[in-house]
Image (cartoon, grey):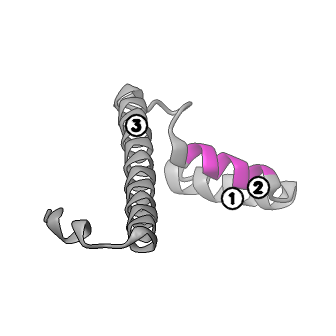
Amino acid sequence: MQYEIYKNYDYNKLVNALNNAEEKRDKFLKEAREQSNLISFLIKELKARLQEPEFYSVDNAPSLKSIRAQILKMPQDEIAKIKAEVDKEMFGS
């Protein structure tokens, strides 16, 4: 930076320059804090994802959990009809 230009400023211009510099610094620090918080959050998310089970069983598979939830909302007669169709396809009875 060229500090020499400020040597010729009067008092009011120096105060304005100081205020502008402080505002720029505060904005920069705020953005740096936000980026730092984002980085911390993303690191935590990645660590959490790495700790998730790599293989799913029938009991903990997310897709099967959502299907079970949908089935629980269905009427019982419709569930019985679907079970009968599945049995017929699988066992031929």
Q: Residue at x 36, y 36 (%)?
A: 43
Q: Name the N-terminal-most of marks 3 and 1.
A: 3
Mark 1 in CB contact with mark 2 (< 8 angstroms): yes
Pick the residue in front: 84 or 5: 5
**Which mark, residue 40?**
3
Residue under label 2, please give it.
Answer: 79
Q: Which is in the foreground here, disc 2 or disc 3?
A: 3
Q: Mark 3: which amino acid? A: Ser
Helix, strand or loop under label 2: helix
Q: Is 27 placed left or right of 65 in the picture?
A: left
Q: Contact, CB < 8 Å: mark 3 with mark 1?
A: no
Q: Is residue 55 above or below residue 70?
A: above
The numbered mark, 2 or 3, whose residue comes first in the sequence reads 3
Where does residue 78 sit, x and y in percent of width and height? Answer: 79, 61
Nearest the viewer among 11 and 2 is: 11
Residue 24, horizontal then vertical, whole percent: 39, 62
Between the C-alphas of marks 3 and 1, the distance is 47 Å
Over which residues does the magenta segment extend?
64-72
Q: Amino acid at mark 1?
A: Ile
Magenta-span inclusion, residue 30: no
The numbered mark at residue 82 is 1
Give the Cα separation between the discs numbered 1 and 2. 5 Å
Q: Tag 1: Cα neighbours inside 10 Å, few (<14), some, or many (≥20)?
A: few
- Residue 37, position in %: x, y? 44, 42
Between marks 2 and 3, how big is the CA–CA gap? 46 Å
